[in-house]
Structure formats: structure tokens, C-alpha cells
Amino acid sequence: MTDMIPFIDLGAQRDRLRSKLDAAIAGVLDSGAFILGPQVRELEARLADFAGAPIGLACANGTDAIVLPLLAMGIGKGDAVFVPSFTFASSAEVIPWTRATPVFVDVDPVTYNMDPESLKAAIDMVKAEGKLRSAAVIAVDLFGQMADYPAIKAICDEHGMKLISDAAQGYGATLNGKHSIEWADALTISFYPAKPLGCYGDGGAVLVKDQHIADLIKSYRVHGEGKERYEYARIGLNSRLDTLQAAILLVKLDAFAEELVLRQKAADAYEKGLKGAVKTPQLAPGATCTWAQYTVEVDDRDAFRSYLSARGVPTAVYYPIPLHMQTPYAPFPVAPGGLPVTMKVCDRVVSLPMHADIRGEDQQRVIEAVQAYAAERAAA
Ligand SMILES: Cc1ncc(COP(=O)(O)O)c(C=O)c1O
């Protein structure tokens, strides 16, 4: 049997950072400050600083990182929140949690991110129906590339809407040198282990610009705590980041900028080796990407995946079924004309092994397998 190359190799990163990680973990165990300890506050400041945001707040995971600003912004019943359907469940599930209504918007065929024209049409539709107030947009930085924030922010401003950047996959990406918080009211991050900046468990953070929103998020993440201990100003949740995870993330954050360079190098090698064989991912002008996933498009995905798997190359599909086609989300509105790009790309996308430590010889194996597949199909 052919040995499989890793899809993501967290072990290689662990080996590279081992002594620092071990010291950071031992430091927390010795301190006994397991919840919201000093490393959490340090991490919050450094995450904000890295992205040019005034305020950083850690929380339990990247899903809570989206619901916390929604709650703090007062989003609720009667509000429409616009979100892509081509995304992970978290981007949309948080909307009904607040009793607001998700409205699904189509994506751009090149970047896979929210299509501003589809957003405009969806807002007009909601306005014409007159039942909901257009309150917020959750744009997703899918696969690590930022959405078209300049265009989306202009639409939000025109309609008095809040803008959240779901940067679970895209924390670290820039457009014209700026992180998404330049345009968004909140930038949300996931530290799920496989994310470009991952911890060793669940973790998340939200970056914001407004002190009032930050104060509300601080309250919501600790059960809605008021000014005194065990006095509650609102109904909240339990969404704290463990100190252990913060200590691990501080070590990983030190290496993060360098890892983004390594990911870009790996993406460049794929682009060079795969161009012409499959549809390779493309960045918008002025964009950098975290390459959370390296996602190509093929005509016959099942055959492609089996072919690669037989040659020791694992693949993954993000995402095979758009959210608006899934039972729990079926009752919610979609942009006028449906979501044709979303439907098309869900059938075609497939992600290849990608991480900062990917070895040249492993990438070469991926490239050769894809090229052999393309050559066989061309000859058939
Ligand atoms: C686009 C997107 N949003 C939100 C999340 C939620 O993050 P978490 O798993 O940390 O809750 C994820 C990842 O899992 C994601 O990919």
C-alpha cells in the first residue's frame, strides 16, 4: 500500500517549536491560573496588534467569536443578517441563535467570497418585502483570502449595517496591506488546531474597534456579568479561553509571520506545478492569503479524489453541500436568482495538502499525481 502524505502535519510544527511549547505549558501548570490568566491578556493585546486593531478579546472558540459581537451589537428578532451559503456552519448558525434571520448571498467564482452584487440584490429584496430590518453582514474569508471588504463596507455604510469579518480561516491575510478590521466592526478568529494559527484544543478571539462593544463582549462571555461578581446585567454565555491555550498560542504567534511566508511559498510551488492541469486558486489584486486551504476545481471530483488517494495523496472537500440546501437552513431566504455560483463550486472544489511544514518532495508527489490525472483525462 502507498503511504499517505499528511494533509496537515501538526507534528512537524510541534517538533519545530517543542522546547518553547513545553516551557509555556509548564509555566501555566506551575502558576495555577488556568482561566483568563495573564497569558490570555497578553495574547489579546498581541492578536490585536498583529492585525492593527485597537482591542482584542479571547473566547472559547471561533463560533462564539462571531455570536459575541452579534449580541453586543444588539442583533436580534426582526433583523436580517447577510451571510454566504458557501461556508462552514458556524458563520450562519450564530444568526438564528440571536433570533435574527440569515439571508444567504452568492459568492464570487474566483475568490469564493461574498459577491457584493448578490449582497446588494439581497438587501433590496429584504427592503421590498418590508418584514425585516437589514442589520448586519457576516463576510467570510474563505480558505484564507479576505472578502472584498472595500465594496462590502460601502454597501454596509449606505444601509447603516454592521460588518463582521469571519476570519476563522483568514486571520493574518491582508488586502492592500490592511487586515479586515480596517473595514469591519469586528474580526473573528478560530484557533481550532487545523487553522493556520491553531491551539491544542478549542479557542477563539474577536478583535473590535469600539470600547462600548468590547465592554459588552466582556460581559457576554462571562454569563452576562455586571459590575459586581455574581450580578448579571444580561443573559450571556460561558466563553472563556483557557490560559494553557493562550500560552500555546503565544509561542505559535511568534512563529506565525514566518509560517505565512512558508505557506505562500508552498502555494507558489503548487501554482507553478498545477497550472493548466486543474483550476488553481487565484488572489484578488493586492491580496495576501493565509492558505488555510489550497483549493482547486475539477470536473469529476470523485474520480480525482480516488486517483490521488491511490497515489498516497489525501484530499478534502470544503464544502460539499451549501448551507442553504441543508434541512435546518432551508426555511431562510436566499438572494434573488438563487445562488448559482455557490451551487457550481460546491460540486467542483477539492483541497490539497497544505501547511507551513509541507516538504518539497511531498508537494512534488501531489503535483505529479494531479498532472498524471489530467494527462490521463486529456488522453481519454
Ligand atoms: C469559516 C469558519 N467560521 C467559523 C469557524 C468556527 O470556528 P470554531 O471551530 O473554532 O468554533 C470555522 C472553523 O471551524 C470556520 O472555518
Image (tube, rainbow, N blue to C red):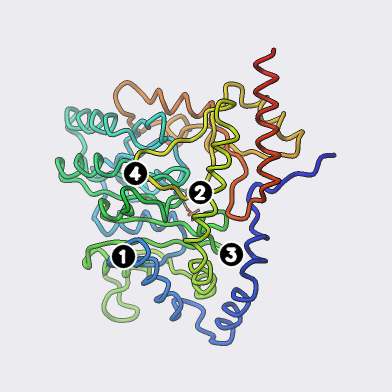
Left or right: 224, with 58 as reference point: left
The disc, 3 or 4, on the residue closer to the chain's N-terminal end is: 3
Residue at left offset 49%, top offset 55%: 260
Residue 264 — which label? 2
Q: CA distance from mark 2 to mark 1?
A: 34 Å
| Residue at the image point whose x is 42% and y is 56% from the top | 172
Q: Earlier in the sequence, mark 2 or mark 1?
A: 1
Question: What amino acid is at disc 1?
Answer: Ile
CA–CA distance in space, label 3 to label 2: 24 Å
| Quarter where residue 113 is shown | top left
Q: Which is nearer the N-term, disc 1 or disc 3?
A: 3
- How far across and how far down the image is residue 221, in percent? 37, 66
Contact between labelled residues 1 and 2, with CB atoms less than 8 Å apart:
no
Question: Which residue is the site of mark 3?
Answer: 200
| Residue situated in front as seen by the camera: 270 or 187 | 270
The amino acid pointed to by label 4 is Gly
Q: Which residue is mark 4?
A: 286
Residue 128: x percent and y percent?
A: 17, 27
Provide the residue designation for mark 1.
217
Look at discs 3 and 2 and give the one toward the viewer. Answer: 2
- Residue 90 is left or right of residue 216, and the answer is right
Gap between marks 4 and 2 measured at Cα: 14 Å
